[in-house]
Image (cartoon, coloured by chain):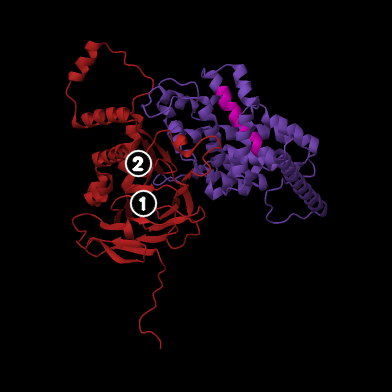
Amino acid sequence: MISPFPKSSSKPGEGHIVVNLAPNKVSTLESITYQYPLKLISPSSSSANKGSVLVFLLSYGGGLVGGDRVNLSVDVQSDAKLSIVTQGYTKVFPSITPDIVTRQKLNVNIRRGAALCLLPDPVQPFERSVYEQIQIFKLDSGASLYLLDWVTQGRTARGENWSLTHWVGRNEVWASTEGGDAKSQLLVRDAIILDGAAGPTRSQTLRESMHGQAIIGTLVLRGPMTKRLGQFFLTEFAALPRLGARDFRSNEAREKEDAVPRSLFDDWRATRLSQEKDLGILWSAADVRGCIVVKFGAPTVEAGRSWIGSMLVQEGSIERDFGEQALICVR
Amino acid sequence: MSPATDESSQQDLELEIAALESRLAAAKQQLAQSKSGVRSKDDNPPHPPIPPTITTSAAHHYLLLLSDSALPLGSFAFSSGLESYLAHGRQRTPNQPAPSFPFFLPLSLSSYARASLPFLLAAHRDPSPATLALLDDAVDATLICAVARRASVAQGRALLSIWEKSLAPSLSCASLSGALAPYALLLRTPHSADDGEAEPPPVSAHLPPLFGAVASLLGLSARQCAYVFLLSHAKALVSAAVRAGCFGPYQAQRVLAGEGLRDAVGEAVEREWRTRVEDAGQRVPVMDLWVGRHELLYSRIFNS
């Protein structure tokens, strides 16, 4: 007997999100589908007063078990806005053998005037994990992307410190043309390869090569909505104190200058700079082919999180355009 | 001799014989192919497309020229993050080790190999201007550290000038000497960018693919090309270390002559021999931070 129900075409780990702009100018979820081990949740409240549709990217059991495949595709239709967040680290559990690769793939299309804000929690690869994450973003002209990709040293409580077997994280930003992608052009390919098994060189372990960093991250910004935030990072990078510079002011002059009341922003910057110095946060920002690429590293996960959070909250445009819900993973 | 060592040395010999035999077979196959004029489509590992007009002795001569530190690429102006690494070491947090050149050198080689060799080898396989332009665009998208980009483009442009002004005229075959002309023309064509979302330029003249193409046109094998490219990187680093005051010239030669460096270069070539262009990237993430933050140094000897 033929089943009266439509056949499910979904494969394990597959998911699809479509967001469009409703006639009342509010971003709405057109469809959302997923299969184990992927889980997607969108709080049902309207996005009307929040700016964007919010989707939680989850997995059953809070992590990916060796060999899991997640394959998520996302379409953000013209002028719609979507924020994707997670609920805690994406844990990558160990693989029994190195040839069992845990994979997460993300394919995103962002149409003209639309925007995706993807600020998840960091990925936490456990000891002996083998992970490959490939995220491909195709942006029509006038589309915007905020992408944060970060990875931690593992579970420090269990003595893990870059104890993973293999890690590949690749992010590609493409400029596409509406209709076909025959003329798509690769703008930026950010790829990190961590080889825990063989080490980056024969004489050095992965842990040594990380040089005390507990977390490393990349923020990529592209498109008209990100202009102000991108400029903010470039300006703050240019304003960093020079390494090896000396303060030639006399004590008196210094006290006098410190006594002059500063603006709230100058206060924030001074506090942030002293934290960067004390905590050992390293970062850089550059404009690469029309994308702003920010790289950062920190000796503790929390230091890294609070640094990026402080930058994004202080500048404020994500909160304004997507609602504070988009920032929950960086606070 | 004890039986155990006897056995292991016998094993070593057997391995060596097997390796020699496979090399002989590969060489015979290559000879047969070049005689019949047929080249199999997916040569792997890539065979050098030795043009008939370049003799082995000429190729050897060019190998020495390309490996010369006097090759006017301006490499002496770049430290590939070494200067920044040393400066960061002076303000390190307690959990970070003190800066040391023996730590930096192999990491830098490994990092540079993963970021550049795939493009270099691909251009060596096919040095046509169209492929070269595609590879150049791919490097431009993959190299996302501003300081490293400037260093790559400065040296790439210098190499293109050397090719046009000095190397190409020395070749008698016009199809060889003019091989990169369309690429150079593309580089010099003014790039029209509408300001809204500026499109990247069609070509930027990054060093790795250009070096691969030039070496290929001059008859160098893929192995030679990759080895010389990484050795030049190591030489530039060691020379930078001397000028940054890490050690003196004798120690520098000792590092260059040492087994450690030979191993590191050979190993890096071996590791990235089959790495696809799409899989190029950063093996040592903190390297991006050191190189990128070179701009923050108060005083600088180098441009990177």
- Which residue occupies 54% across, 30% down? B105
Magenta region: B226-240
Residue A301 in picture, x, y percent from top left: 32, 40
| Disc number lying in front (1 or 2) | 2
* Mark 1 Cα shell of 10 Å, populated few (<14), some (14-19), many (≥20): many
User: Dot 1 lies on which element?
Assistant: strand
Residue B228 falls within the magenta-colored stretch: yes
* Magenta span main SS: helix
Quick one: B164 or A249, which is closer to the camera? A249
Residues at badges 1 and 2 in contact (C-beta under 8 Å)?
Answer: no
Query: Mark 1 belongs to which amino acid?
Result: Lys
Q: Earlier in the sequence, mark 1 or mark 2?
A: 1
What is the letter of the red chain?
A
- According to the picture, the residue beneath numbered tag 1 turns out to be A91
- According to the picture, the residue beneath numbered tag 2 turns out to be A156
User: Dot 2 lies on which element?
Assistant: helix
What is the letter of the purple chain?
B
Residue B111 in picture, x, y percent from top left: 52, 37
Residue B99 in picture, x, y percent from top left: 46, 25
